[in-house]
Image (cartoon, rainbow, N blue to C red):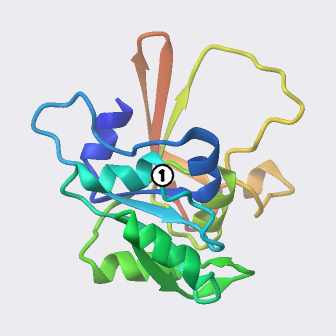
């Protein structure tokens, strides 16, 4: 299902933390007739290894791998990533990180209409704070990890009261084997 979601979007966005932790390819493997989305890595310090799977994917996919970074990122690392097949794009920073709004403007300039965020809490939080999220597709597995160090879904922008939380409407639920997909549009207007 995740690969089908990728196929439905023009781009897929992750942060460098996801690249370093998971080494994802960010392709639509195993789907006939599928096209790979443009792969986008938000990496303010250019820590993405030139041998990362997401960079190597550019050699076997029609879609490019874009590394969005800040203007202050090291030129030497940019050259190494470009030599490996990635396209390094410098955008504005906010708080020392790639600015979500600047990233969205750059994607729009490249005719990207839809982007799937698969990144961790830092990327999710930055796009959430920028109100650049219009739909949430959340996969829930029936497993309890009970890890006190577990990462949140999105970092920052916490609400102090449940009444101030954003609402998803309409919400759809779908069983995928033992897992459940919760899907809904974000209501950014007045909270109930």
- Decide if residue 144 is on the left or right side of residue 189: right
Q: Which residue is mark 1?
A: 51
Outermost right residue: 148
Report the side of 42 relative to 9 (left or right). Answer: right
150 or 166: nearer the eye? Answer: 150
User: On the rendered structure, is 148 left or right of 133?
Assistant: right
| Quadrant holding the N terminus | top left
Q: Is residue 3 visible?
A: yes
Total numbered badges shown on the rendered structure: 1
Q: Position of residue 130 (x, y in %)?
A: 59, 73
Residue furthest out toward the left = 33
Q: Position of residue 174 (x, y in %)?
A: 40, 23
Residue at position x 33%, y 49% in the image = 57
Residue 191 lies in quadrant: bottom right
Residue at position x 74%, y 56% in the image? 155
Q: Is residue 190 visible?
A: no
Residue 190: % across, % down: 61, 67
Q: Residues within 10 Å of mark 1 (few under 14, many from 20)?
A: some
Kind of element beneath mark 1:
loop
Q: In the rendered image of this protein, does residue 92 appear above or below residue 120? A: below
């Amino acid at each position: 299902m995740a690969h089908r979601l990728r196929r439905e979007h023009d781009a897929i966005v992750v942060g460098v933390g996801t690249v370093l932790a998971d080494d994802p390819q960010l392709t639509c493997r195993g789907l006939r007739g599928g096209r790979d989305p443009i792969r986008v890595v938000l990496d303010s310090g250019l820590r993405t290894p030139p041998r990362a799977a997401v960079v190597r994917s550019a050699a076997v996919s029609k879609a490019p791998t874009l590394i969005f970074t800040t203007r202050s990122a090291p030129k030497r690392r940019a050259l190494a990533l470009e030599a490996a097949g990635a396209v390094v794009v410098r955008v504005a920073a906010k708080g020392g990180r790639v600015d979500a709004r600047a990233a969205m403007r750059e994607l729009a300039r490249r005719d990207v209409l839809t982007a799937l965020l698969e990144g961790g809490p830092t990327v999710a939080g930055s796009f959430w704070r920028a109100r650049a999220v219009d739909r949430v597709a959340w996969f829930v597995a029936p497993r309890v990890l009970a890890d006190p160090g577990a990462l949140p879904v999105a970092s920052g922008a916490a609400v102090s009261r449940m009444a101030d939380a954003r609402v998803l409407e309409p919400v759809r639920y779908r069983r995928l084997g033992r897992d459940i997909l919760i899907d809904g549009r974000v209501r950014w207007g007045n909270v109930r």
